[in-house]
Image (cartoon, rainbow, N blue to C red):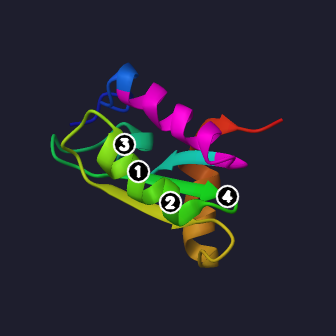
Amino acid sequence: MCTGKTGIRRQVLEEIIDLAKFYDLSRVILFGSRARGCYLEKSDIDLAVEGKNIVDFALDVDEKTDTLLQYDIVDLSTAREELLENIRKDGIILYEKI
């Protein structure tokens, strides 16, 4: 489905942002099919994250958000250049610490 929207409920996005703040992450970027607005109903939620508590964030985002969708969490500091290019091109910043 190509809608130009992410297909992720506002409540889930807010829960992701709250967890990013709780774990003191620097940045969370939505990328992949949901960021492009061209996804299937059961497409996963691809998140690129930057910070020190990524493993804890990844565990909790899967457990504590109100969605049955799967997450794919990528650490920006270890991501391949090809993936970084896609994130730069299509990514939507959900949270950035200032």
Residue at 30 percent across and 28 percent down: it is 3
* Front position among marks 2 and 4: 2
Residue at 67 percent across and 49 percent down: it is 25
Give amino acid for label 4. Glu
Main secondary structure type of the part rendered in magenta: helix
Q: CA distance from mark 3 to mark 4?
A: 19 Å
Label number found at residue 60: 1
Label number found at residue 50: 4
Determine whether the residue tagged by mark 1 lies in a helix, strand or loop: helix
Give amino acid for label 3. Arg
Determine whether the residue tagged by mark 2 lies in a helix, strand or loop: helix
Badge 3: residue crowd in 10 Å (few <14, some 14–19, many ≥20) = many
C-beta proximity under 8 Å, tags 3 and 4? no
Quadrant in the rendering for residue 94? top right
Label number found at residue 56: 2
Query: Which residue matches tag 3?
Result: 34
Q: CA distance from mark 1 to mark 3?
A: 20 Å
Give amino acid for label 1. Asp
Q: CA distance from mark 2 to mark 4?
A: 13 Å
* Front position among marks 2 and 3: 2
Mark sitting earlier along the chain (1/3): 3
Give amino acid for label 2. Asp
Residue at 39 percent across and 20 percent down: it is 10
